[in-house]
Amino acid sequence: MKKTILILLILTLIFTTACWDMIELEDRLLPYTVAIDLSREDTEEADEKELFICFSYPNINALGKNPTQEDLTYIINSNADSIFEATSEISSRVHNPVFLKHLNVVVMSEEVFSNEKYVRQVLDGLKRDFIINKMIHLLVTKESAHELLLKKLESKRQETIEGLLSTLLLNEQKSTSFTPIRLNEFIQYMDHQRVAIVPLAIPEPEIALEGGGLFKDYEFIGYIEKEDNRNIAILTNKSNNEDIDIEYDGSKISLQLLEIKAKKKLVKNQEVLTIKYNVEMDAQIHQYIIDPSKKIDSTKVLDDIEKKASEVLKEDFATTLEKLQGELNADTLGILEYLYKFHPKIYKEVEGDWDSIFPYINIDLDVKVNIRRRGLSEY
Amino acid sequence: MKDPKISNIQIRAILVSTIIGIGILSLPNQLATAMDKDGWIPIVLSGLLIIPMIIIINKIFEANPGKDFFMIGNETLGKFFFTIILIIYLTYYIAVCSYISRLLGELIKGFLLPETPIQLIVFLFILSSSYVAVSEINIIARVSYLIYPIVIGFGVLLFLVSLPGSDFTNILPVFQSDLSQLPEGMKVALFSFAGFEVLFFTIPFVEDNRRMTKTSISAIVIVTGLYLVLFLVTLTQFSIQQIKSDPFPLLMIAKLIDLPGFFLQNLDGLVMSIWVAVIFSTFTPLYYSSGKILSKLFKTKTHAIFILILVPVIYFIALRPKSIVELNTLMSSVVNYLSGVVVLIVPIILFVVGRIRGRNKQ
C-alpha cells in the first residue's frame, strides 16, 4: 500500500514540476485600450476584413527608475474581423504574447457602432471570452477611434501611466458630463430598460468625454449633449455632486448641490400612465456678491433662492425629458424597469408596445432644493 | 482492524461538502431558465423535500442496528435485486465523477491554464483525489471537515465581495413566474441536493447514533441557506436574461468584482482555486463510495485496489464527450436520471420493503 502511494506521489511530482502556463508578467503585452474602426482601404487585405483594430499598451521599458525607452505607450493595429483575430494578426509583429485580461476600454467609431451587427458581435466577443475583464468600459467617438488613440499620445498634459481614457472613465473627478458604463451594465440596461448611454469621446481640442451615444436594443439612435447627460444622471441617481449657477436678484449665485436623491413613483388611477418624480437635494452657497444690501440672513431669502434654483433645475429637466420622449423616444430613466420591478401587472400591459406608449406618458417633476449652508460670509 | 468512527460534526461536514459541488456554479442559471426570478421557490421546496428523505435513511439504519448499507440491502431486497441496485449506484457514481472531473478540467483550462492540456488537468485531479479515496471513511470525513470551512467560506466570500455592486431591487418582482414550470425547477433543484445519499456509507460508523437525524437535517438546512443566498446574490448582480444566457453566473460574479481604485479586480482566479477544493470534497466521497461498492461486489477486503482501477475508467469517460455542450446535455441528463433513482427511489424502496418484512416477521 505504502509503495503504491509513494509511486503515485513520485508520478505527481513528475507531472507537476513542468508548467505549460508559466509566463512572467514582463513577458506579456497587456493592452488596456482597444479601438475599433471599419477596415482601412489604404492597406492590403482591407477589402476582406471588416474591422480595423488598434491596441494601445503600456511600454514597460519606459517605466521604473532607469527607463531605456521614452514612449509610455505604444500602439499597434491590424485589419481583422474580431479582436481575437487581431491579436493573432499582430503576433507576427510583437515580441511578446498579447494578454487581454487587463483590457479596460473599448472605443468604437461611429461607422462601427452605428451598425447593430458589429455592436452585437464585438460585445459578444468581450462577454464570451474566458479571459477578458467583464468590467471593461465602453466608449464611442464620432471620428476615427484609431486617431483618438494617436491623439492621446500627443497630449503630454493628460498623460497617465495606466491610460488616459481609463483614468478619465474611472471618474474620480465626479464629472456629470458623461456617465461611465461597463460592459456588464450595458447588457443589463439593454435587458431592463432597453436603452443605454455610452460616453462620447471628443478628440478636439484635447481629449474630452462629453455627452454620449444612445443605444436602443443594441442599435444606435442618436447623441445626447452633456447637459442632457447631467440631467439624466441626476434623475437616475448617478450623480451626487453638482455645481450650478443661477441668476438671483441681479447677480449670480453659485450653488453646490449635494445628496441628490431622485425617486420615481407611479401615480395610480390616472387615465394616462403618470410617473411622479421627486428630486430632492441639499445645497451650499459657494458664491454670491459682496454687497451689504444683499444679505443672506433670513429664511425668507433662503426660501427664495431655493425656489429659484428649483425652477431652473425643473426647467432643465423638462427640456431633457422633452427630448427623450420626443425625437429620441428613449426611456433612459428606466421607467419600464421601474414598472417591471414594482408594478408587474402594469408592466405586462405596456411592455409590448412601450415604444409607442413612452412618448405619451406623463412625467410630473417635483424638484426641491434645501440650502443647508451659506459659507463663511453673510454678505 | 479497528472500526473507523466518525463524529457528528464530521458527518455534517461531509454532507455539506459533498452536496455543494459542481452544481453550485450553474445552479442560478438553470433555476432562472426554469422559473425566472422565482428560482428560490424550488430551492426551498427541495430542501423541505430532502428532509423526509434524510429521516427515512436514518430510520432504515435505526431498524437495523449495527449493520451497514450492504448488509441491510442484501437482507431486505435479496441478493439479486440488491446487486442490480449496486450496479446502478456504481454507474451513477462513475458518471458523476467523470462529469465533475471533465467540467472542472474545462473550467480550469478556460480560466486559469489555457495552455495546459485538459487531459493532464483531469488526470491529475483524479489521481490526487484517489490518494484520499483509498483511505477509510473516517479519513475522508476528516478531509471533509478540513474543507468544510472553505465550502462555507466560498459562499460567504462571493456574497461579501459582490455587496458593493449589488442592486437589491433586481430581486423584484417576486411571484411572477409560471407555476407550471415548477416541476422543471424542482428537477434542477433536487439534483443540486444529490450527494446526501453518502449517508448510506457513513451512518454505520457514527459514534453517536441518537443525534444523527438532527445533524443531517442541520446540514441540509445549511446547504439550502447557502443555495438561497447565492441565488439571490446572482439576482442582485445581473438581469434575468443575463443569468439565463450565462452558464456559470457565480464565476461571472467573481469577474465583476471591482473594489475601488484597481484594488481588487478579476477575482476569477482566486474563486476558481477555492472552487477546486470545494469540488475535491465532493469528488472524494463519491469516488470512495464507488470503490466500496466494487469491493463488495467482488468481495475483496479493501477497496483501495478498485480506486486505482477506476482512475483510467473515470478518465476515459470524462474525456468522451466531444464538447462542453455535449457534456452538459448528454452526460448531465444521464446523471440527472440516475440521480433520481439513487437519491429518491432506492431509499424509499429500502424503507418500505424493510418495514413490510419487519411486520411479517412479527
Image (cartoon, rainbow, N blue to C red):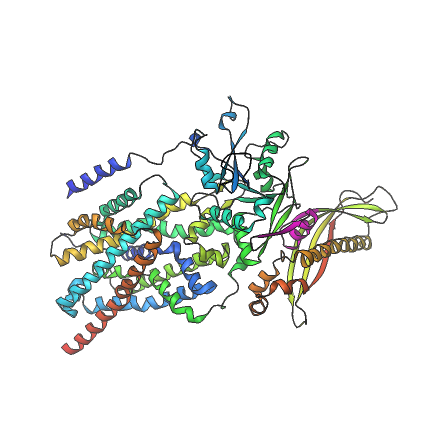
Can residue B296 be spotted in the picture? Answer: yes
Query: Which residues are drawn in magenta?
Result: A218-242
Horizontal arrangement in the rendering, residue B54 relative to residue A244 (left or right): left
The x and y percentages for residue A112 are 56, 45
- Residue B234 lies, with reference to residue A159, above or below; the image says below
Q: What residue is rendered at 49% in x and 59% in y?
A: B240
- Residue B215 lies, with reference to residue A206, above or below; the image says below
The picture quadrant where one finds residue B244 is bottom left
The x and y percentages for residue B77 are 16, 69
Residue A270 on the magenta segment: no
Label tally: 0
Furthest residue to the right? A293
The x and y percentages for residue A7 are 18, 39
Horizontal arrangement in the rendering, residue B358 relative to residue B165 (left or right): left
Q: Nearer the viewer, residue B220 or B107?
A: B107
Can residue B20 be spotted in the picture? Answer: no
Q: What residue is rendered at 71% in x and 55% in y?
A: A317
Quadrant where the N terminus of chain A sits is top left
Horizontal arrangement in the rendering, residue B259 relative to residue B12 (left or right): right
